[in-house]
Image (tube, helix red, strand yellow):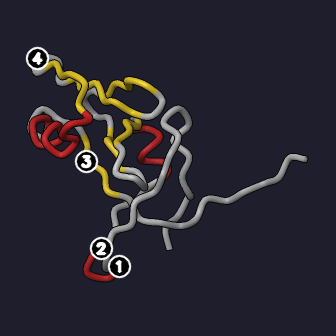
Amino acid sequence: MKKIFRAKPVLIEAMQITEDSFNEVCEWIGDDVHDRDDTDFIVRIKTYEGIMVGGLTDWIIKGTVDEFYPCIDEVFQQKYEEVDMEKEGEIHTVKMTTYQCKFDDEVN
């Protein structure tokens, strides 16, 4: 029988790929970088679902077991807003499906 579920509200860590942040993003991903193209600012990331590609303006999200996934900017902007950490405290990561970038619409 099919059931309906709602994702638990959590905070995530993410970095956007820009020309200026590309090296820092790749260093953050660490050993999960499969390969990278420093000319076109593209990084291929080893994930549980296989190799996934992030490029300029994409966001790299850190999941619940320290895995990394790319998410296109349009989807990221619809789903997330920046959190004032002085008010929120500790960061908690969330597992996501990269294909659909499934996350709560709001963070409590």
The reply to whether the C-beta atoms of the residues labelled 2 and 1 are less than 8 Å apart is yes
For the residues labelled 2 and 1, the Cα–Cα distance comes to 6 Å
Mark 4, other Cα within 10 Å: few <14 / some 14–19 / many ≥20 = few
Q: Report the residue marked by disc 3.
A: 15
Work out how far the residue at label 3 is from the one at label 2, CA to CA, in angstroms: 16 Å
Residue 46, quarter of the rendered image: top left
Label 3, secondary structure: give it: strand
Quote the CA–CA distance across marks 3 and 4.
Answer: 19 Å
Q: On residue 45, which mark appears? A: none
**What is the spatial separation of the Cα atoms under label 2 and label 4, in whole angstroms?**
34 Å
Which residue ends up furthest to the right in the rendered image?
1
Ranked by sequence position, the earlier of labels 1 and 4 is 4
Looking at the rendered structure, the kind of residue marked 1 is Glu
Instruction: Tell me where residue 27 appears, x and y as whole percent.
Output: 13, 41
- Which is closer to the viewer, label 3 or label 2? 3
Dot 2 or dot 4, earlier in sequence = 4
Type of amino acid under label 2: Asp
Quickly name the residue at label 2.
84
Which class describes the residues within 10 Å of circle 1: few (<14), some (14-19), or many (20+)? few
Mark nearer the N terminus (3 vs 4): 3
For image coordinates 40% across by 53% down, the residue present is: 65
- Estimate the spatial distance between the alpha carbons at disc 3 and disc 1, rounded to whole Å: 18 Å
In the rendered structure, find residue 39 and report the number of the disc placed on it.
Answer: 4
Q: CA distance from mark 1 to mark 4?
A: 37 Å
Q: Provide the residue designation for mark 1.
A: 88
| 45 on left or right of 19 | right
Say which residue appears at 56% left-offset and 37% top-offset.
100
Q: How many marks?
A: 4
Under mark 3, the amino acid is Met
Secondary structure of residue under mark 4: loop
Q: Position of residue 11 (x, y in %)?
A: 41, 65
